[in-house]
Image: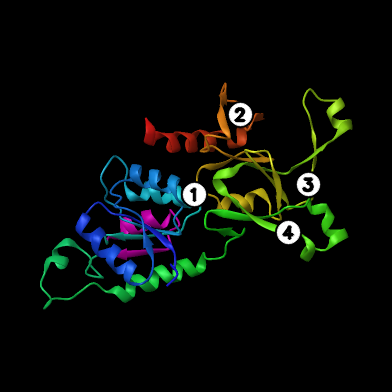
Amino acid sequence: MKSKGHILVVEDKSLIYKRIKMLLKEHHYTVEDYTPSVKEAIANINKIKPDLVLLDIDLKGEHKGTYLGELLSSKYNIPFIYVTDFDDNQTFYEGLKTKHGDFISKNKINLNEENLRIIQTKPHLDEERLIRSIQTVLEQNKKKPVPIIKNSILAYVDYVKKTKELGVDELTQVPIALKEIAFFTTDSEEVDEDKTKNSNKTIYVKLQRNNARIQTWLKKSYIVPSSLSVILKSMPNYFVRINDYYIVNIDSEFSLQGRINGKYIKVADQVLEISDRYKADVEHKIENLYQKIR
């Protein structure tokens, strides 16, 4: 049966993690490897973006689950559910600020180490409560703004301005592997001669509104009929927006070539400016992405 979604379980107690993993697999979800800390969770998110995160609050390491919850909501656009030992109002309202999908007490569903060790005469995990919450949150977030299929994105091979001449049904779409993408941009490949004359750099004609161009590290171009803000919500965390006109792949060895004075980034032989508006997020994502190899 086709997977209902990929779930990251951030839980520092291995027995509880194994029980949740078993339950999720029984209900046809795929599950990420054991992840007991926020640091390891970020590393796993950088490798593959989960559809949902089940998040404990009391974790190994320097950060609590609420810290990751804030990142999931504000930076990664990944829905999540707290599954925690804590059941007090202070923790609940602290978690509520991070815009979680649900807040479930482990005690209410008998999901703690003591209950899981008790013999079968005692109450079991309330599977229905947990699974229904997962399915509800996934349903609320299931619509993908751009067509992502098996780590690829469907894109048009023809420049979108031809749609008026040929009709949308006559254009060909092809899947482009995300790892092959150097950047998304609202710039076309056509140079704006007038603006370039009055500038110290090359200025390109902009695409029609709500359209973006993919450029691969092999310098092939494709068109996606979506805005950059919509595209970014569906991308893995190794894609980062650097200014109003570009989203770049900072993970590919073929595209990312480095940074220049913290103000520019070199991608697929192009030097692109990092605007002040996005600089903090760029630094944050680069730091998190490359921490796993330090």
Q: Residues within 10 Å of mark 4 (few under 14, many from 20)?
A: few
Q: Is residue 277 visible?
A: yes
- Separation of marks 1 and 3 at Cα, in angstroms: 27 Å
Amino acid on which disc 2 is placed: Lys
Q: Is residue 119 left or right of residue 62?
A: left
Amino acid identity at mark 4: Thr
Q: CA distance from mark 1 to mark 4?
A: 31 Å
Q: Earlier in the sequence, mark 2 or mark 4?
A: 4
**In the image, is 160 to the left or to the right of 10?**
right
Q: Secondary structure at mark 1?
A: helix
Residue depicted at 50% across the width and 45% down the height: 237
In the picture, residue 245 is in which quadrant?
top right
Checking the image for residue 172, the label placed there is 4
In x, y percent, where is residue 27?
A: 36, 72
Q: Residue 19's x, y, as percent?
A: 24, 64
Q: What is the spatial separation of the Cα atoms under label 2 and label 4, in whole angstroms?
A: 31 Å
Horizontal arrangement in the rendering, residue 77 relative to residue 107 (left or right): right
Q: Which residue is mark 1?
A: 76
Nearest to N terminus: mark 1 or mark 3:
1
Query: Which is more foreground, mark 1 or mark 3?
Result: 3
| Tags 1 and 2 touching, CB below 8 Å | no
Disc 3 is placed on an element classified as loop
Q: Does 100 lie within the magenta span?
A: yes
- Tell me the number on the disc at residue 207: 3
Task: Establish if 208 lies above or below 167.
Answer: above
Task: Find residue 42 and report its image quarter.
Answer: top left
Mark 4 or 3, nearer chain start = 4
Residue denoted by label 2: 266
Q: Which mark is first along the chain, 2 or 3?
A: 3
* Residue at disc 2, secondary structure: strand
